[in-house]
Image (cartoon, helix red, strand yellow):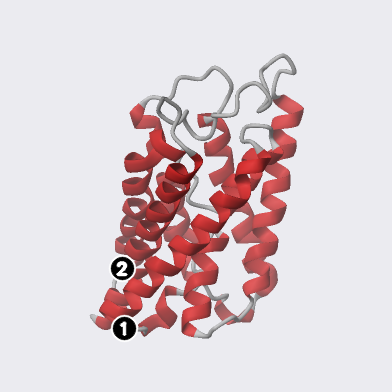
Amino acid sequence: MKTSLASRSLAELVGTALLVGIGCGSIVAGANAGGVSQGVLAVSWFLAVLIPVLAFARVSGAHLNPAVTLMLVGSRRFPPGEALPYIVAQLAGAFVGAGAVLISLGGAAHLGATLPRGDDLARTFVFELGFTVALLLSVIYLSWPQKVVKTWELFLPPIVVGCSTFIIGPWTGSSLNPARTIAPAVLSGDYLGIWVYFAAALVACAMGAAFVWFFEPRTVPTVASDTKRAIVDPAE
């Protein structure tokens, strides 16, 4: 039996809550402890993505990110009619995760909000765009038509996020995910440069969808006949 949209949306909510809770929680906990290395934060964010991906990839596709959902819709890999429930669930999950961090650990380090270092918005846009495209390319690889996804391949998006945290984290906070950005920003009240993160994600979505439209064989099924495809097919 196909997993219901309500069940898949709930999986997106819980998965995104885990992602934000673990990732932003590591930032706040590190700040409370007097600081941690960027390498530790990179590992924390790798796990923050890996855990819900392994838990929910075969339930909802484990998008966990509005940028992923929108790109999959634009590239004909996900039904447009299911995008809004997924995105609402992801945003709700992000607030649940960030709220749990605030209650349990406090609001240090702006609750893990993504902030441009030195107010350099141009650099922030370029860095965020580059790594968001890399993240979306990993999703495109996993969702390529007729591909059978191996469990170890599900590590690819978490690896991208971990590398992004290590490389550009000190400069941008490493978002790659509008839900991950908006929840800590709202709950901490710090919106500095937030529009740049959204702009980078939207441009990355367009680039990812354009890549698929240009390189994907035109004979493969679209969402009209294959509505389940996401990162991996949700369980039957």
Secondary structure beneath dot 1 equals: loop
Above/below status of 7 relative to 216? below
Residue 106: which disc? 1
Residue at point 50%, 56% (across, down) = 89
* Image location of residue 198, percent across then percent down: 65, 64
According to the image, label 2 marks what residue? 26
* Image location of residue 68, percent across then percent down: 57, 46
* Image location of residue 178, percent across then percent down: 57, 62
The quadrant of the picture occupied by the N terminus is top left
Seen in the image, is 180 located left or right of residue 75?
A: left
Amino acid type, label 1? Gly
In the image as oriented, which residue stretches furthest toward the top?
A: 219
Pick the front one: 71 or 112: 71
* Image location of residue 227, percent across then percent down: 60, 28
Residue at point 59%, 46% (across, down) = 69
Above/below status of 221 relative to 128? above
The quadrant of the picture occupied by the C terminus is top left
Seen in the image, is 30 located left or right of residue 61?
A: left
